[in-house]
Image: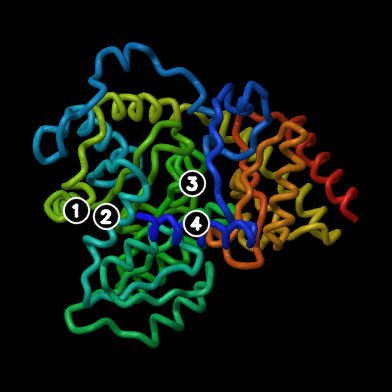
Amino acid sequence: MQWLNDRCQQQLDAADQANLRRTLKPVDMSDGRTMNRNSTSYLQFASNDYLGLAAEPVDLGVLQLSLPGSGASPLVTGYSQSHSVFEKSLASFTGYEAGLYFNSGFTANEGALSTLIQSQDIVFSDRLNHASLIDGVLHSKARSIRYHHSSVDDLKKRLEKTQPSEGGQRWIVTDAVFSMDGDIAPLAEIAQVARDYNAVLYVDDAHGLGVFGEKGQGSCHALGLSASDVDILMMTCGKAMGASGACVLSQQTVIDFLVQKCRSYIYSTAPSPQTLEVASAQLKKLMLADQRRQYLKELSQYLFDELAARSQQGLFDIQSESHELQGMHHPVHPVIVGDPAIAISLGQYLLEHNIIVGVIRPPTVPQGTSRLRVSLNAAHTFEDVARLLNVIDSYFAKSS
């Protein structure tokens, strides 16, 4: 084992030298807007709990009447009535025939794409797609072509130049909201391109569910799209819903095929009935959170405007091109400083002022785009955001 330790240590040392090493830092959630670490309370702008639901207690009856474990894979005895009810509820809410629940968004994307896409197909993927989408396409063994980020024109050019193998199918795979920038894909235009070129459209709306659309139905719904426009939709339960897991939504035949063939579904122990009961309870809360959604939209607009003003002064970049689409502002906002050492320094400075913000560096984001990822939720106040901005201003004033 010494050779393995040596190899790992060598690569860890290299990550240290490049300011790219990641660490685990335990925290305790408090009330959604704050976190506790080592008995110190911090104002947090780092979680994906956009509506603040994850920090709210669940009805104890939900927990007392459901089992803490499933005991088996879903195709043996692990699939319960709780699983079925949630899948049908989310499918009905989003306008799809059926859904299939996975342990996480990563396993949902990787499993669904690697199962549904065949080796003779050809896949067109956004250059900034989530790692789970990239891995799912890679494991399908199909040819993959990446188009420029959110560029419908580049997508069209690549579709026109490339034909799938005999018996193959074109696929277009994209995030709806890109989680490191908070920018929104031009889904209506992409859906039209998919129709024009007879391509299957797969959309990951992990960060849109609960934030956008009537009753929080998501990005596709907010942009006027339905199940007839987006063939396969993936939504996670661990972000705005404040639960855990994820669901792939599509026609019943597609879901049935996944049950037969998807290895990450078949060979995993099913999540507990308790997990699904919590998800069902949280989905109901999400549907009723219109007031929180409106408040979050106003808060996001305020932060975006303030960051944009500072960006124009040359303090940092915010990549604002597609952050706003048809009046939609996502609660994730990047503060792009480029150098990972500066990102770490700014993150540490905020920490010293009792503020936690995610510090994001390569390979999660492209080289030269290290950043702070500021994530709002409905528990934040305008005063909280002003405090964050004041500390950021103080850092750059000190550094100039």
Mark found first going from the N terminus, 3 or 1: 3
Instruction: Point out residue 12 in the picture as x, y percentages from the top left corner.
Output: 53, 57
Q: Which residue is mark 2?
A: 111
Instruction: Point out residue 115 in the picture as x, y percentages from the top left corner.
Output: 22, 60
Q: Which residue is mark 4?
A: 9
Q: Which residue is mark 1?
A: 263
Taking depth in this image into account, of 341 and 360 the one nearest to the observer is 341
User: Element at badge 2?
Assistant: helix
Measured Cα–Cα span from mark 3 to mark 2: 19 Å
Measured Cα–Cα span from mark 3 to mark 1: 25 Å
Measured Cα–Cα span from mark 4 to mark 3: 35 Å
Q: Which residue is mark 3?
A: 207
Q: Is residue 40 above or below residue 252?
A: above
Residue 315 in the figure: left or right of residue 146: right
Residue that appears at 62% across and 45% down: 358
Q: Amino acid at mark 4?
A: Gln
Measured Cα–Cα span from mark 4 to mark 1: 33 Å
